[in-house]
Image (cartoon, rainbow, N blue to C red):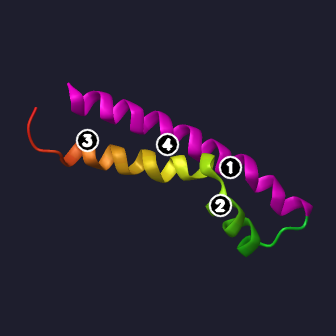
Amino acid sequence: MIRFFLFLIGFGFSIIGFMYIILYLNYLTIGYTFLEYLVFIMKRFECLLALIGFTLIIIAIFKKGD
């Protein structure tokens, strides 16, 4: 049961994080270079939720027990 909730929380975090990463792609149209864009999203917490969520999903899938 814990694995299921861990998976759901990870999935939610991933959706939120990737949504913001896609939304911030608009900065490329106003003159940011791709490298500046990458540095920008690495500093934003809401974009780091994608990495945190992906990690939680991996943990939920490969965790032993339950």
Tag 2 secondary structure: helix
Query: How far across and how far down the image is residue 12, in percent?
Result: 48, 33
Does residue 9 belong to the magenta stretch? yes
Query: How far across and how far down the image is residue 20, in percent?
Result: 67, 45
Question: Local crowd at mark 2 within 10 Å, few (<14), some, or many (≥20)?
Answer: few
Identify the residue at image location x=51%, y=49%. 50
Segment tinted magenta in the rendering? 1-30
Residue 43 is labelled as: 2
Q: Earlier in the sequence, mark 1 or mark 4?
A: 4
Question: Which quadrant holds the N terminus?
Answer: top left
Residue to which mark 1 is pinned: 22
Question: Which quadrant holds the C terminus?
Answer: top left
Of badges 2 and 1, the one in the foreground is 2
Tag 1 secondary structure: helix
Query: How far across and how far down the image is residue 43, in percent?
Result: 65, 60
Question: Local crowd at mark 1 within 10 Å, few (<14), some, or many (≥20)?
Answer: few
Q: Amino acid at mark 4?
A: Ser
